[in-house]
């Protein structure tokens, strides 16, 4: 184990600053099916699950993924089997990974977020779960389906509700949506609500149209854009939050940087912008050695610079 790669997200110790990003690595036996399972688990600092909700959800109609220039659009629609089956079928498998497990949670009302957090805390008898990642990009059924994530008041309330239920037993991470005018306002609201960490960004709203049948390509008409094309946006948002939020700058509220990371260079840019760790989604669909490759790249870079990841977080901001 290379100590210079180790970081902490509040009480979660990561042996390397690399995480899967929610919805792109499943929640059960996907990693077990890989020939390079051992190397993936050795490279990862933590595993983040697909979004889990209280009840089963079938998600959106097909087609649900379409390739676009330098990225993909998806409209999976938070398909999952519900929290009860998640504990029966997935958690025993996740336990075998031997790394911290973070459960991404989704809900349609504020009280449902609290209820779900409470269920997870109660059901986690063997302490397999280290943290919860709140997906505030979920549609709010009380407000006609508009995402919670663009309203700072609602974001603060959701975080408070979840925190009240889990106290300090689980690390609470709030995953921010880029579909807002000023992400720092939403980040501040999550901090006011008591979040332990932030992750950013979720997908950007987008769509594609088939010019032959003259209809939207996705079954849900619109979807979320991810992959290399969103990297400059995610990087900017991490940089802005680190620059303008004192708790982030003091590293009291760590940031998990996500969005378009495709190689070691991208990962390092996010760390220099202010991320303590990084999450990878779309690139994992293309290259199942991405975590090993980035792990190697970071190790080489740190050796050459005689540095640690912790020392380099936010270094692009200089000493101002
Ligand atoms: C197919 C797919 C499913 C996703 N599902 C979720 C989800 O359940 N919860 C969530 O918070 N984010 C979800 N995301 C967003 C990703 O976790 C990530 O934030 C986004 O894709 C940007 O990272 P990337 O460019 O590395 O893919 C999903 C993304 C994709 C592509």
Image (cartoon, rainbow, N blue to C red):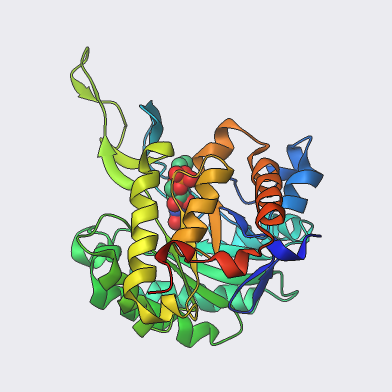
95 with respect to 206 (left or right):
right
Residue 286 horizontal/vertical position (percent): 57, 31
51 with respect to 155 (left or right):
right
Camera sees residue 108: no
Viewer-side residue, 45 vs 84: 45
Residue 92 horizontal/vertical position (percent): 75, 59
In the rendered image of this protein, does residue 21 appear above or below residue 148? above
Give me the residue at 51% from left, 75% from top: 172
Locate the C terminus and report the quarter of the image it occupies.
Answer: bottom left
Viewer-side residue, 134 vs 145: 134
Give me the residue at 74% from left, 55% from top: 93
Camera sees residue 14: yes
Viewer-side residue, 226 vs 137: 226
Residue 271 horizontal/vertical position (percent): 51, 59
- Quarter of the image for residue 225 reads top left
Give me the residue at 79% from left, 34% from top: 35
In the rendered image of this protein, does residue 273 appear above or below residue 290? below
- Quarter of the image for residue 292 reads top right
Residue 243 horizontal/vertical position (percent): 35, 70
Give me the residue at 48% from left, 65% from top: 315
In the rendered image of this protein, does residue 282 appear above or below residue 125? above
In the rendered image of this protein, does residue 83 appear above or below residue 260? below
- Quarter of the image for residue 167 reads bottom right
Locate the N terminus and report the quarter of the image it occupies.
Answer: bottom right
How many marks do you count on the picture?
A: 0
């Amino acid at each position: 184990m290379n100590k210079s790669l180790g970081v902490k997200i509040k009480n979660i110790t990561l042996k390397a600053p690399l995480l899967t990003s929610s919805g792109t690595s499943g929640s059960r036996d996907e990693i077990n099916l890989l020939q390079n399972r051992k190397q993936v688990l050795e490279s990862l600092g933590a595993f983040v699950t697909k979004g889990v909700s209280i009840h089963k959800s079938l998600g959106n109609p097909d087609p649900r993924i379409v390739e676009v220039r330098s990225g993909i659009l998806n409209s999976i629609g938070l398909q999952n089997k519900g929290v009860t089956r998640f504990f029966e079928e997935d958690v025993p498998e996740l336990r075998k990974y031997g790394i911290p497990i973070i459960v991404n949670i989704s809900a349609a009302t504020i009280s449902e977020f609290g209820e779900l957090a409470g269920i997870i805390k109660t059901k986690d008898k063997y302490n397999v779960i280290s943290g919860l990642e709140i997906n505030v990009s979920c549609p709010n059924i009380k407000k006609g389906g508009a995402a919670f994530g663009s309203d700072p008041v609602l974001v603060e309330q959701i975080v408070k509700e979840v925190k009240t239920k889990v106290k300090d037993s689980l690390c609470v991470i709030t995953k921010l949506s880029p579909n807002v005018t000023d992400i720092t306002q939403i980040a501040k609201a999550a901090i006011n609500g008591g979040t332990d960490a932030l992750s950013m960004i979720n997908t950007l709203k987008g769509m594609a149209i088939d010019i032959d049948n003259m209809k939207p390509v996705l079954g849900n008409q619109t979807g979320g854009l991810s992959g290399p094309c969103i990297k400059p946006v995610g990087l900017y948002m991490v940089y802005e939050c680190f620059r303008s939020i004192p708790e982030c700058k003091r590293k009291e509220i760590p940031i998990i940087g996500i969005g378009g990371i495709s190689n070691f260079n991208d990962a390092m840019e996010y760390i220099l912008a202010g991320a303590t760790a990084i999450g990878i989604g779309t690139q994992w669909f293309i290259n199942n050695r991405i975590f090993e490759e980035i792990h190697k790249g970071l190790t080489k870079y740190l050796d050459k610079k005689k540095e640690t990841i912790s020392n380099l977080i936010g270094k692009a901001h200089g000493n101002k």
